[in-house]
Amino acid sequence: MKEIKMEDLLHDLLSEELILVFVILFLGSWLGQLKIKGIGLGSAGVLVIAMIFGHYGYQVSPTIQNLGLSLFIVAVGLQAGPRFFRMMRSNGIVFCLISLFIVCSAVLTSVFVAKVFHLSPPLAIGLMTGALTNTSGLAAALQATNDPITSVGYGIAYPFGVLAIILFIQLLPRIGKIDLIQDLEETNNPIKTEHSPEVMTFKVTNPKLHKKTLSEIAFSRNSIVISRIIRDGHTMIALHDTIILMGDHLVAVGEAHELELFGKYVGEPVDTLLENPDNVQFRKIAVEDDEIVGKSIKELKLRRKYGATVTRIQREGIELNQNPTMPLLRGDVLTMVSSESRLDELEKLFSRKKLTVTNIHILSISITLLVGILFGMIPIPIPGLGTMKLGLAGGPLIVALIIGHFGKLGPIHVRYYGPANHVILKLGLALFLAGAGTTAGQGLVEVIQTEGFKLVVSGTIITIVSIIIGYTVARKLFKFGVVYSLGTLCGGRTCTPALGALNQLVDSEDPAIAYAAAYPFSLIFGSIAAQLILIFF
């Protein structure tokens, strides 16, 4: 009887593609979770393991790789869509410019090191995406270059790209002797826009308003919300049928310029020390229920049905002005004023189906992928340069951003729970890296033997230049504080581990807000740059 060797058995098993894929995902995930002094490879662990398997001749099919790429890109677009276009309309243009500076500095530095060290364009582009830790950029680069060596550059530059920014964040406050808490207190929040809501109190002196209800007030502005009425030292919840008397103090929330007009109509602004008696409570309630998502405050009739007033809406860390016709999104946090019992009732209403793990619909995600892939196949003319296609990375990304912003494609709703979208993103990324890694691993050793030192030095230069440029622009040009500059730098370089390191230094949500503001811009710019950089070669 012929003896079966362990090596042959292992080879036969790994020749089955599904077994190969899941072995790579298992080992890569395990490697990515290993940390040395809090620093780990994360998702890049799958890429490293896949490159090793690729070196020994194992290959994941392009179909699986492209499926993973499409899922990953769509998840990124759906996640960033609501925030991306909203930030463009506000001070987000500042974060957009900082992200643009970071990506452009990486592009120019990559072209420079490629010329100096005589690196091939695909390799240089891979180094750039790795130095920026921008996986969506790698996806776009592979589509543009159609060369697996791009993944080699990414895999070499990525670890130092993560390590460098973490060290920068940890060492900067020590070397500069910076008190980050004091820096936060002395720095204005750059996320706050000129349209952020404010609170003012007005004394009613207009005789035309005496014995009128709130619903009868002629002054109608969407951004103005009367949250409370103070009468003879007692605070009342403001409802539509609440009668206003001369001398009442109206606590109003809205945009500054509209509050000024409202004050002239009502009477005069006053300084009132607000008290919160037992029957008037404030509470922040998150939108989680499927039946609430997509409806407006006006449709929900919260004042009429529950005697509650929404004074503020927070979305993705950004405080928005209350607009009764604005559709609510999952994850929105509403500041409500009412009695304790009614707020308890509302909290149950808004958090129904909280145990639902996912709401992924195959119909919606399939049509999003289909439209995105078809859009990516359309040739786009570029004067003097011919045409280019957005491909499997750019097409689905643009379409998903637009759909993510509106929340639907025609009658089909395409907005998932955060955990559900996270599952799509993680699964897609893992499959994509498994395919890209095995393809790149076929020439890994040869590239490292011939270009190893050059690649390490090139990746280091790209990383350091982009960090210095990004921080300097945020700090000096836009006058951000240190904490906001570092948070923006983390988002501009799409480096979540770095944000974790910053959160360990300062106990505040402000770094995450700055990170969230810059992150989607950098994803988009990184993907576009990875395709357009070929023009410079």
Image (cartoon, rainbow, N blue to C red):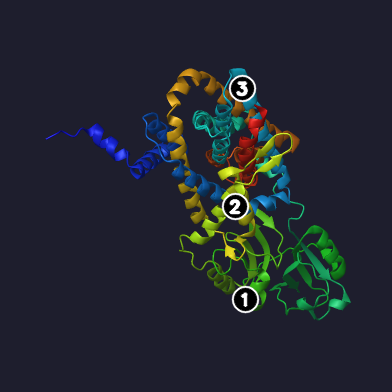
Q: Nearer the viewer, mark 1 or mark 2?
A: 2
Q: Are marks 3 and 1 in contact (CB under 8 Å)?
A: no
Q: Answer yes or no: is residue 141 visible.
A: yes
- Mark 1 residue element: helix
**According to the image, label 2 marks what residue?**
400
- The number of numbered discs placed on residues in the rendered structure image is 3
Distance from label 2 to label 3 (Cα)? 34 Å
Label 2 secondary element: helix
User: Please, what is the three-letter code of the amino acid marked with disc 2?
Assistant: Ala
N-terminal of the pair, mark 1 or mark 2, is 1
Q: Quadrant of residue 213?
A: bottom right
Q: CA distance from mark 3 to mark 1?
A: 64 Å
Kindly indicate whether the residue at mark 3 contacts the one at mark 2 (C-beta within 8 angstroms). no
Residue drawn where x is 68% and y is 56% of the image: 319
- Mark drawn on residue 113: 3
Relative to 516, is 13 on the left or the right? left
Residue 192, given in percent of the width and then of the height, sits at 71, 50
Q: Amino acid at mark 3?
A: Val
Q: Mark 1 highlights which residue?
A: 306
Q: Earlier in the sequence, mark 2 or mark 3?
A: 3
* Along the viewing direction, whichever of 135 and 198 lies nearer the viewer: 135
Instruction: Pick the residue in front: 191 or 210.
Output: 191
